[in-house]
Amino acid sequence: MAAGAPVAILNSDPIMHNVHTLTFENRAVNRSQPPGVKKIEVEFPVPEKVKVRCDVHDWMNAWIIVVDHPYHVVTGADGGFMIENVPPGTYTLEVWHESLGTTSETVTVEPGGTAEAGIVMTAEG
C-alpha cells in the first residue's frame, strides 16, 4: 500500500477479533474488533513491513507492505500480477514473501510498451 493511504481492516466474522500491528517506524495499532465493528481504518505514513496479528486467534496474521511510490500490487492466487501506468525506464522489481524472503529482477519498460518478469521463488531445503 502507499504510505499515508488508508487501509480498511474488515471483520466479516460473527465473533470478536483483535487488530494488532507490529511496527518499527509507524504508530502501532492494538484494537478489538467485535462483530459489530465491520471495518477499522488505519494509516501508515512511513514505508515499512507491518505485521498484523489477531491476539484472540494466534493463527491469524497478515503483512502490510507500505511503500513510498505508486507502483505496488498484491499477486493473484496464481502468483500473477500487473502494475499499470509505469513510465518508460529501467527498474528493479522486488518481490517479498514472509517465508521465502526477497528477490528482485531488472525490467525495462519501453515507451508505449510493456515488460514481463519471470520471477520464481522457491523454498530452500
Image: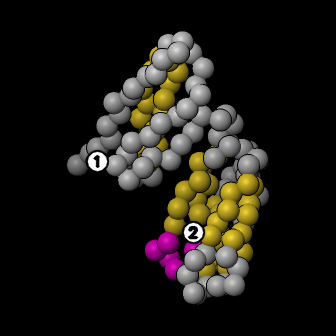
Residue 94: x percent and y percent? Answer: 48, 33
Q: Is residue 124 magenta?
A: no
Separation of marks 1 and 2 at Cα, in angstroms: 24 Å
Which of the two residues, 11 or 68, is positioned nearer the viewer here?
Answer: 11
* Label 2 secondary element: strand
Res 53 label: 2
Q: Is residue 57 magenta?
A: yes
Q: Give the main secondary structure, helix, strand or loop, of the magenta stretch.
A: loop
The kind of residue on which mark 2 rests is Arg
Q: Image check: 43 left or right of 64?
A: right
Which of the two residues, 74 or 29, is positioned nearer the viewer here?
Answer: 74
Q: Splitting the image into 4 quarters, where does residue 50 fall?
A: bottom right
Identify which residue is drawn at 50% across, 47% down: 74
Q: Name the residue under label 1.
A: 123
Q: Splitting the image into 4 quarters, where does residue 120 fall?
A: top left
Give the extent of the magenta segment.
53-60
First in sequence, mark 1 or 2: give its number.
2
Q: Image check: 64 left or right of 59?
A: right
Residue 75: x percent and y percent? Answer: 45, 46
